[in-house]
Image (spheres, helix red, strand yellow):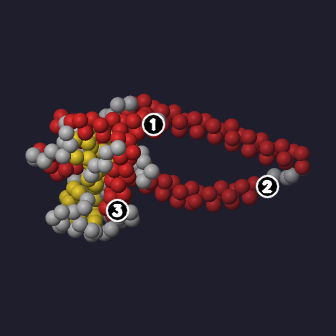
Amino acid sequence: MSLTSDRPKNRSPLRYRSLPQAGDGLSDALQDGLFRMVLIGMLPALLFGSMLGEWARYWFKIPPGPWQLTILFFLSIPVAAWLMRHQWAKLKNLGQGLHGERTVGQLLETLRAKGYQVFHDLQQERGNIDHTLIGPGGVFAIETKTISKPNDRDGKVTYDGQRLLVDGGELERDPVAQSLAVARGLRQLLKEQTGQDVDVTAVVLFPGWYVETLARDPKVLVANENYFLKSFDHNRRPVLDDTMIKLLSSGLEREGRSER
């Protein structure tokens, strides 16, 4: 077997690691501590089960039966391997998604210099919003999709205004429909918190991908993180004044604090 056949079929679309976030060290230490607690807690649980088994054998005069446990042990190996393989793939996707959201979030933070307020991971009934922008150019609800890229070619995302394809195929969940639902939820949330009914632009970002939009006036803005960020370098027509920006931002701050 050649070495090249063992290479993974997909790769992360992100070229660089995201910068450290506030509290990253404590977060890692907390997760490590929780994992250690689980392992420590498993030891007395296993010993308790063994103790009950031994007492049962003692009181009921049950002879040793190693064959049953031996068979179960060997049967558990492929089952555990299958579960761990799927769990590892899930953890890998979660880690890649976290990397993508943090990378995009750090880029969006630079827009504060242009008068934008930035909110991350806002929870709502229709699902969480990865990033929210409120500024002179309006309100943006941003979904981040960090999808692995093929190793043998540099695929692209195409969007015709209705259908979105990633490397020629559809995703399991339609990002367009998801982003529109999230944008509607954000609009309703802002109305409830501030009494203002404002338009919310739905955005789907694919970090590290080349994105081709074939529609002139799409209902959802689909782009990569760099193109979206550069779009704020152009003179956007002001939609919100400072008073409205502060009002809407205060509403989201109240909502965010109420979640804790």
Q: How far apart are the alpha carbons under marks 2 and 3?
A: 58 Å
Where's residue 67, x and y in %?
A: 74, 58
Q: Which picture quadrant has residue 122?
A: top left
Q: Residue at x 35, y 44 (%)?
A: 195
Q: Residue at x 42, y 30 (%)?
A: 26
Q: Which residue is mark 3?
A: 177
Say above or below: 219 vs 115. Answer: below
Is the C-beta separation of discs 2 and 1 under 8 Å? no
Q: Which residue is mark 2?
A: 65
Which element carries disc 3, helix, strand or loop? Answer: helix
Is the C-beta separation of discs 1 and 3 under 8 Å? no
Left of 63 or right of it: where is 3? left
Where's residue 147, x and y in %?
A: 32, 57
Q: How far apart are the alpha carbons under marks 2 and 1?
A: 57 Å
Q: Which residue is mark 1?
A: 258
User: What amino acid type is highlighted by mark number 2?
Assistant: Gly
- The image quadrant where one finds the N terminus is bottom left
Q: In this rendered view, identify the residue nearer to me: 132 or 57.
A: 132
Give the label on residue 106, or none.
none
Q: Residue at x 33, y 53 (%)?
A: 183
Q: In this rendered view, identify the residue nearer to me: 82 or 203.
A: 203
Q: In this rendered view, identify the residue nearer to me: 40 or 185.
A: 185
Front label number (1 vs 3): 1
- Whichever of labels 2 and 3 marks the residue nearer the N terminus, that label is 2
Where's residue 255, x and y in %?
A: 41, 39
Q: In this figure, what is the number of numbered marks?
A: 3
Which element carries disc 2, helix, strand or loop? Answer: loop
User: What amino acid type is highlighted by mark number 3?
Assistant: Ala
Which element carries disc 1, helix, strand or loop? Answer: helix
Q: Residue at x 71, y 40 (%)?
A: 47
Front label number (2 vs 1): 1
User: What amino acid type is highlighted by mark number 1?
Assistant: Ser
